[in-house]
């Protein structure tokens, strides 16, 4: 091990709260404040060391830093649930598409290109994902207040606003578009190549009632049920873990407690504080 570096006898730490104009870069604000600090250092070098530097930390960074582990865990659980849910929808699209093989074969026979079929099926998948995003945002408007009420009142500043804002809407729209494309392209690609010779000669009822079709439908339904159970179990586990993380026993009663920092002079400092 290397030698431990001793903290200087006189160390300085200033904490100031400033409000920046909307759109002001943090680097520009830090540079402007650094000019003032350098001027103070030239005028009063005893109280302002030459190596004093300005660091800007936003309120979100300060508050969310305490919940970094919990938020990462929650975000990972949400991503896993999103993937499972999208896979479930992809299976449903594939199952629905098998019942439309006769329709797709007829469209190909009258001149529809494969790209046109893929575009049609992909558009249906994107519309489905956008509808889910709209319903999710609507539920979030109702659920965000309930989730905020579950958090301990001392866990975040009272002036912090927890709400669904424009960034959340943009993120939801982007996720809906991306998931609709990623999980809709595979069924669209597979269903865009119908077997014309077999499907046109047979009726749609006969085709849907064939043994191969029934086995495929049973397999897809079994996969859907399995993924739904995994989705429900994962959602319950994520919510349980989140509540447990936010209600961890602190070992003391945080109600009616005031926290403050006191800088005592060396002559008045008790021996046990040395």
Image (cartoon, rainbow, N blue to C red):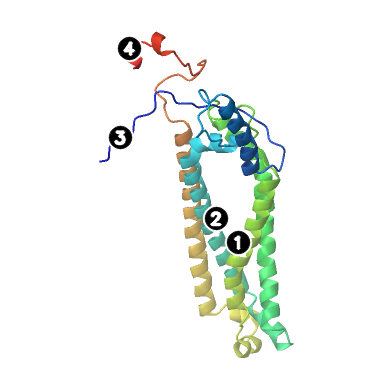
Report the side of 91 relative to 102 (left or right). left
Which is nearer the N-term, disc 1 or disc 3? 3
Q: In the rendered structure, which disc, 4 or 1, sits on the residue that comes first in sequence?
A: 1
Q: Residue 179 has which mark?
A: 1
Question: What residue is at 40 percent from the left and 8 percent from the top?
Answer: 268
Asked whether residue 179 is in view, the answer is: yes
Q: Where 18 falls versus 199 (above or below)?
A: above
Depth check: 175 or 55 in front?
Answer: 55
Circle 1 SS class = helix
> Do the residues bearing badges 4 and 1 touch, measured as CB atoms within 8 Å?
no
Q: Residue 82, which numbered label? A: 2
The disc label shown at residue 4, or none: 3
Q: Secondary structure at mark 4?
A: helix
Q: Are marks 2 and 1 in contact (CB under 8 Å)?
A: yes
Q: Secondary structure at mark 2?
A: helix
Measure the alpha-carbon separation of dots 2 and 3: 48 Å
The residue beneath circle 4 is 271
Report the residue that reaches farthest toward the top: 268
Real-space Cα distance between discs 2 and 1? 9 Å
Q: Residue at x 47, y 16 (%)?
A: 263
First in sequence: mark 3 vs mark 4: 3
| Whether residue 156 is situated above or below residue 253 in the rendered picture | below
Check if mark 1's residue and mark 3's residue have beta carbons within 8 Å.
no
Residue name at image x 65 percent, y 42 percent: 28
Q: CA distance from mark 4 to mark 1?
A: 63 Å
Disc 4 from disc 2: Cα separation: 57 Å
Give percent across and percent down for residue 227: 49, 58
Label 1 – label 3 distance at C-alpha: 52 Å
Choose the circle earlier in sequence order: 2 or 3. Answer: 3
Picture coordinates of residue 238, whole percent (x, y): 48, 44
SS at mark 3? loop
Do residues under tags 2 and 3 come within 8 Å of each other at their CB atoms?
Answer: no
């Amino acid at each position: 091990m290397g030698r431990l570096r001793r903290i200087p006898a006189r160390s300085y730490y200033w904490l100031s709260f400033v409000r920046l104009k909307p759109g002001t870069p943090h680097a520009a604000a830090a540079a402007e404040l650094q000019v003032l600090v350098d001027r103070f250092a030239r005028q009063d070098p005893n109280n302002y060391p030459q190596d004093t530097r300005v660091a800007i930390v936003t309120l979100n960074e300060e508050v969310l830093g305490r919940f970094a582990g919990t938020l990462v865990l929650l975000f990972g659980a949400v991503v896993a649930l999103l993937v499972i849910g999208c896979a479930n929808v992809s299976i449903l699209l594939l199952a629905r598409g098998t019942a439309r093989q006769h329709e797709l074969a007829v469209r190909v026979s009258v001149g529809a290109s494969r790209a046109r079929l893929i575009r049609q099926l992909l558009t249906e998948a994107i519309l489905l994902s956008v509808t889910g995003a709209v319903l999710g945002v609507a539920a979030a408007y109702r659920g965000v207040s309930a989730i905020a009420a579950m958090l301990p009142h001392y866990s975040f500043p009272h002036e912090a606003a927890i709400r669904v804002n424009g960034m959340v809407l943009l993120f939801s729209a982007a996720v809906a578009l991306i998931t609709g494309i990623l999980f809709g392209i595979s069924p669209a690609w597979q269903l865009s190549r119908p077997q014309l010779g077999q499907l046109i000669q047979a009726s749609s009822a006969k085709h849907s009632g064939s043994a191969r079709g029934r086995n495929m439908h049973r397999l897809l339904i079994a996969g859907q049920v399995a993924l739904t159970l995994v989705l429900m179990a994962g959602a319950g586990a994520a919510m349980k873990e989140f509540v447990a993380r936010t209600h961890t026993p602190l070992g003391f009663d945080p109600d009616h407690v005031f926290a403050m920092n006191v800088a005592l002079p060396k002559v008045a400092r008790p021996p046990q504080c040395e």
